[in-house]
Image (cartoon, rainbow, N blue to C red):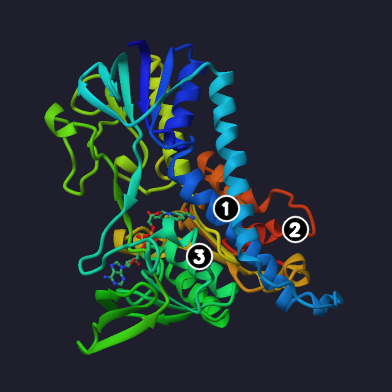
C-alpha cells in the first residue's frame, strides 16, 4: 500500500496529462492503467492508429490520382497490408513509450491493473489498496452497442477491430456517418474497398455546419463512398466471413439488405465506468450514464473528480486534456479553467473538416444576429497547386460587434488552420482583427484571412 496526493484512474489523454500537471504542481501522483501500454483508447486504438492509416492511404491516393499530372510517372504502389499494419503499430509504440518516458521524468507511478474505488480516499488495484487525498476518474469511453448487432471484431467490428482487419475487405458497410465512420470509411475506400455508409439521419456528421455537411458529402461521394441516408439499421446477420445488414428507409418504411465482407459499427460511444464501484459509492450520474461533476470537475463525493469522455461534453482527446490540466490545478488549490466555447473539432479525412464555436443553424435558432464571411479554396494559389482547392472557410461574426462567434473549414490543413480562429476567439477578437493580420503567401491560411475580410470590406481574391 502506498499513499498519494492524487491517483488518476485511466492513462488516456485526459488521465496522463492530468498526472503530468499534478506532478508539475508538486503532488505525489500515480496513474492506474490495466492495458499493457499507456495512452488509453486514443493512443492505442483510436486517434493515433487511425491517423497512421489515414496518412498511408492518402499517400496511395495521391500516387494513384495526382502523381502522373505532376510528371511523376511509373507504376502506382501496391498495398502490403501487413506492412501497413506494422507501420501503424510502430507509430502507436513510439507514442505510448513517449508517455512512459514522461511518467518517469515526472516521477509518476504506474499502478498496473484495473482500478476500483472501494471508498473515498482509497483506490484498489489487484489485491492492493492505495490511499489518495484526491482521485480523478479518467476512464474514458467505449463503443455503444446497437440493438440487433453483435460485434465479433472480425466481420462485425467497432473502430477497434477496423484498425486490425485480417485483410482489406472487398465490400465494407459502415453504420453511422459520424467521425469514426467517415475517417475509417475513407481509409478502406482509398485502399480499394467498396464502401457503403448507412446513416439514420438525412445529413452526415450531425451537428456540423449545414453547408459543410453538403460539400463534405459531395466530395466523399466523388471519392467513391456510397451513402444510404435516412436508413435505420435493424439488425446484422453475420457468418464467419460475410454479413447482411438489414435496414429500413425512414421515408417509406421499406426494408432493404446490404451485403458486406466487413461491417463497421460507428454509431457513437458511451462513458466507460464499469467496475469502478461508483454505484456503491453513491456517485451521481447523468441520465446519459456520464459521471456528474460540478464546475470544478468534482463529483458529489468530496475528493473524487472526473474528466474526459466519462463526463458530459464532446468526446474529444483535447477536451479531456484541458479538463485534466484544469482538474489538476484545482486539486493543487489553484484556479482550473476550460473555455468550453472554444473547443475545436476536426475530422481527419482528405480534405480535413474543422469547426469551432457557433454554427449558423444554432445562432438562427437562438435569434442571434450574425454575418458570414466565406472564401473558397479555389481562390487560394497554394491549394490549387496542391490539388486541394475543393472546400472553403466560413467565419461567423456578431452582426453588431464583429466579434468572431465561430468558424467552419473544409479544405487542406483545416485541422491546423482552425487554431488561428481558436486563438482569435480566446482573445475575443473581431473578424477585422483577423483580416488586419498579415498572412504569409502562399499559404492555406490566406483563405482564413480572406473569409475574415469577407465579413467586412470583402475578400480580395474572390
Ligand atoms: P458519432 O456520434 O460521431 O456518429 C454516429 C452516427 O451514427 C450518427 O450520424 C448517427 O445518426 C448514426 N446512427 C446511430 N444509430 C444508427 C442506426 N441505427 N442506423 C444508422 N445510423 C445510425 O459517433 P462515432 O463516429 O461513432 O464517434 C464516436 C465519438 O468518438 C464521437 O464523439 C467523436 O467525436 C469521437 N471521435 C472523434 C474523432 C476526431 O475527433 N477526429 C475521431 C474518432 C472518434
**Side of 48 where 441 appears, left or right:** right
Residue occupied by mark 2: 443
Residue 124 visible in the picture: yes
> In the image, is residue 127 above or below residue 413?
above
Task: Give the total of numbered labels.
Answer: 3
> In the image, is residue 102 above or below residue 415?
above
Which one is in front, 237 or 353?
A: 237
Q: Secondary structure at mark 3?
A: loop
Pointer 2 local density, CA inside 10 Å: few below 14, some 14–19, many at least 20: few
* Quadrant of image for the N terminus: top left
Which one is in front, 442 or 104?
A: 104
Distance from the alpha carbon under mark 1 to that under mark 3:
36 Å
Q: Secondary structure at mark 1?
A: helix
Pointer 1 local density, CA inside 10 Å: few below 14, some 14–19, many at least 20: many
Residue at the image position 29 percent from the left and 50 percent from the top: 270
- The quarter of the rendering in which ligand 1 is drawn is bottom left
Residue occupied by mark 3: 166
**Side of 222 where 300 appears, left or right:** left
Residue occupied by mark 1: 418
Amino acid at each position: 500500500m502506498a499513499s498519494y496526493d492524487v491517483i488518476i484512474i485511466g492513462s488516456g489523454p485526459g488521465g496522463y496529462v492530468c498526472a503530468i500537471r499534478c506532478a508539475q504542481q508538486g503532488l505525489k501522483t500515480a496513474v492506474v492503467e490495466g492495458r499493457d501500454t499507456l495512452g488509453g483508447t486514443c493512443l492505442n486504438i483510436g486517434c493515433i492508429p487511425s491517423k497512421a492509416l489515414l496518412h498511408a492511404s492518402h499517400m496511395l491516393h495521391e500516387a494513384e490520382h495526382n502523381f502522373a499530372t505532376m510528371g511523376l510517372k511509373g507504376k502506382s504502389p501496391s498495398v502490403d497490408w501487413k506492412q501497413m499494419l506494422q507501420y501503424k503499430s510502430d507509430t502507436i509504440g513510439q507514442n505510448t513509450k513517449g508517455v512512459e518516458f514522461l511518467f518517469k521524468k515526472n516521477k509518476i507511478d504506474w499502478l498496473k491493473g484495473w482500478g476500483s474505488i472501494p471508498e473515498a480516499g482509497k483506490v484498489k488495484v489487484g489485491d492492493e489498496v492505495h490511499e489518495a487525498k484526491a482521485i480523478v476518474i479518467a476512464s474514458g469511453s467505449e463503443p455503444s452497442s446497437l440493438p440487433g448487432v453483435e460485434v465479433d471484431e472480425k466481420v462485425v467490428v467497432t473502430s477497434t477491430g477496423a484498425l486490425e482487419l485480417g485483410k482489406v475487405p472487398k465490400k465494407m458497410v459502415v453504420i453511422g456517418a459520424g467521425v469514426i465512420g467517415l475517417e475509417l470509411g475513407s481509409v478502406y475506400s482509398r485502399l480499394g474497398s467498396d464502401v457503403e455508409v448507412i446513416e439514420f439521419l438525412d445529413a452526415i456528421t450531425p451537428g456540423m455546419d449545414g453547408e459543410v455537411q453538403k460539400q463534405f458529402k459531395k466530395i466523399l461521394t466523388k471519392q467513391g463512398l456510397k451513402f444510404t441516408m435516412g436508413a435505420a439499421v435493424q439488425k446484422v446477420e453475420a457468418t464467419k466471413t460475410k454479413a447482411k445488414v438489414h435496414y429500413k428507409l425512414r421515408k417509406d418504411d421499406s426494408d432493404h439488405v446490404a451485403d458486406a465482407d466487413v461491417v463497421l459499427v460507428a454509431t457513437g460511444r458511451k462513458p466507460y465506468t464499469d467496475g469502478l464501484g461508483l454505484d456503491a459509492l453513491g456517485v451521481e450520474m447523468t441520465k446519459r450514464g456520464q459521471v456528474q461533476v460540478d464546475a470544478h470537475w468534482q463529483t458529489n463525493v468530496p475528493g473524487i473528480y472526473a474528466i474526459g469522455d466519462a463526463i458530459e461534453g464532446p468526446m474529444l482527446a483535447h477536451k479531456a486534456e484541458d479538463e485534466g490540466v484544469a482538474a489538476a490545478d484545482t486539486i493543487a488549490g489553484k484556479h482550473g479553467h476550460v473555455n468550453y466555447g472554444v473547443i475545436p473539432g476536426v475530422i481527419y479525412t482528405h480534405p480535413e473538416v474543422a469547426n469551432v464555436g457557433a454554427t449558423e443553424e444554432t445562432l438562427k435558432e437562438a435569434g442571434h444576429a450574425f454575418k458570414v464571411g466565406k472564401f473558397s479554396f479555389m481562390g487560394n494559389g497554394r491549394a490549387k497547386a496542391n490539388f486541394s482547392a475543393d472546400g472553403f472557410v466560413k467565419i461567423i461574426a456578431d452582426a453588431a460587434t464583429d466579434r468572431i462567434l465561430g468558424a467552419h473549414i473544409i479544405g487542406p490543413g483545416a485541422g491546423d488552420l482552425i487554431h488561428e480562429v481558436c486563438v482569435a476567439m480566446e482573445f475575443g477578437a473581431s473578424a477585422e482583427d483577423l483580416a488586419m493580420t498579415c498572412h504569409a503567401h502562399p499559404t492555406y491560411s490566406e483563405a482564413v484571412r480572406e473569409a475574415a475580410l469577407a465579413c467586412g470590406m470583402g475578400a480580395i481574391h474572390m
